[in-house]
Image: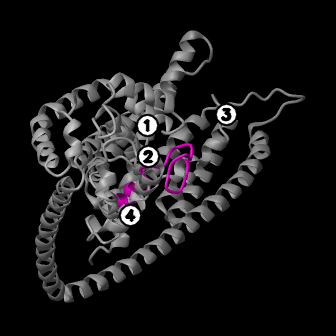
Amino acid sequence: MPITEEDSFFIENIVNINKRIYVILFWALIVPVSFVALTYVGVWYVPTLYAVMVFLYTLVMASICCILNKTGKKTLQHVTMYLGLIAISGFVFLLGFKGVIVLTISWAFAPFISCLYYNRRLTRITTIINFILTVFAYWLKSATVTLVLSGVKTPMRWFVENVPGVIIEFIFVFLVTDFLSRRTYETFRRLMSINADKDGAYKRLNEKTLEQFNTNKELQEKNEYIEKLNKELNSRNESLSENQHKIVEFVVKSFGSFDIFGVTHNYHVGKYVQEICKKLANSGYYEEELTEEKIECYMLAALLHDAGKIRIPQRIVNKVGKYTEEEYEIMKTHPMEGRKILEGMPLIDDGSFNIIAKEMALYHHERWDGSGYPYGVAGNTIPLCARILAAADVLDALISPRLYKEPKSIDEAIKVFEEEKGKSFEPCIADAVIGLKNEIVSIDLDFKTMEGAKFDDELARWKKFYPELEVLGKAGK
């Protein structure tokens, strides 16, 4: 007859409990050893022969149970089960019949251990055997009890007076162990039934899955084909995004046709935006916002921040000297004009680049304290990208030549940021610029070295059409 999963569970449980029983018996060897030790030091008197008998009995029974259990043969596990319970019952009997020590609850040890086998019949038999052994032990013990009280008691009288208590105790033990073994057995049967139902459900599900295997294989092939198409599409999107960025740079270079300082200024600002962003992130500001990808996006979008100047008359954009009040008011419209122009720009990077470019164009002349234009907004109302760009824009304007002024030194520019901290600029952004002083010196030198000759050629071309530019010299002088 084949062994079911349920039978397998109970057999495995028997093996495990058998192992625990012989381990308990080996630990019980401490008891007779302690008898001898305590007798030797005079704390207690236990006959040595009696202690040796208990030791040898326990050692032999523990060893037999251990050997039978380790054979691994399932047919011997039931034998080991009964033998182990008998061994424990016998151990308790040997301790109790001599009268050397007084045992009470120890008589119930074997019945309670038997509950772990989930076998109600076994538990009942074990309880009854232990009851018989207990009564027999009391009978033997009655002959050794000292009978000196108010009068002379016979061993029989002592036995008759004590056995009723034993009977009452074992009635309770029987009821409790019988209840435990029955309830645990029913509980595990119910759990096994539930698991069997689940296994049946899983089996049916697996059969259904197997039926759908061919369909799933076909779907898998389609998914692989779709994945291949997605990879090709992603590759094309990356190429398209790269081309879009190149177009942005081409447009920026075209600014040189209407603004003599426009191209170099835009690239300078983009570089300073990148450095300020890195400084902020390294200092613990806006770390989640200023990722490497976002910083690259900010730097590229910064190239378009002055796109609105295309709609400002060239006589104003390239005027030598300061603006009149009327000219300045016209120039102040370039942020709104820039936003309008960028509204028509094709989407780049799913449109996220377009949003940042329009925010930079519209808000880069706003100030932290609300004194800027075109709307006079303040604080965090100004987008972060525009707050950073505003600092980069002012920095380059201060240290670069313009048609209306000579460039300031970098020390003078840093002093402006120290004075305008919390006014024109967010404090942490002003601190970032101040902390970048050494880097700014190096970057500015590189710009002047690379752009000097190129600026001279560009200036010569402009002078043909604007004689008033004859007063200008080389960039950076």
Give the mark nearer the N terminus: 4 vs 1. 4
Give the mark nearer the N terminus: 1 vs 2. 2
Q: Are marks 3 and 1 in contact (CB under 8 Å)?
A: no
Task: Please tell me whether mark 2 or mark 4 is closer to you in this view.
Answer: 4
Give percent across and percent down for residue 48.
Answer: 50, 20
Dot 2 amino acid type: Arg
Give the mark nearer the N terminus: 3 vs 1. 3
Which residue is at 50% across, 32% downward?
421
Name the residue nearer the viewer: 349 or 82. 349
Judged from this view, the residue extending furthest toward the front is 467
Q: Which mark is residue 234?
A: none
- Residue 148, picture quadrant: top right
Which residue was labeled with disc 2? 387
Which residue is at 33% across, 44% downward?
66
Which residue was labeled with disc 1? 429
Q: Quadrant of the N terminus?
A: bottom left
Q: Which mark is residue 337?
A: 4
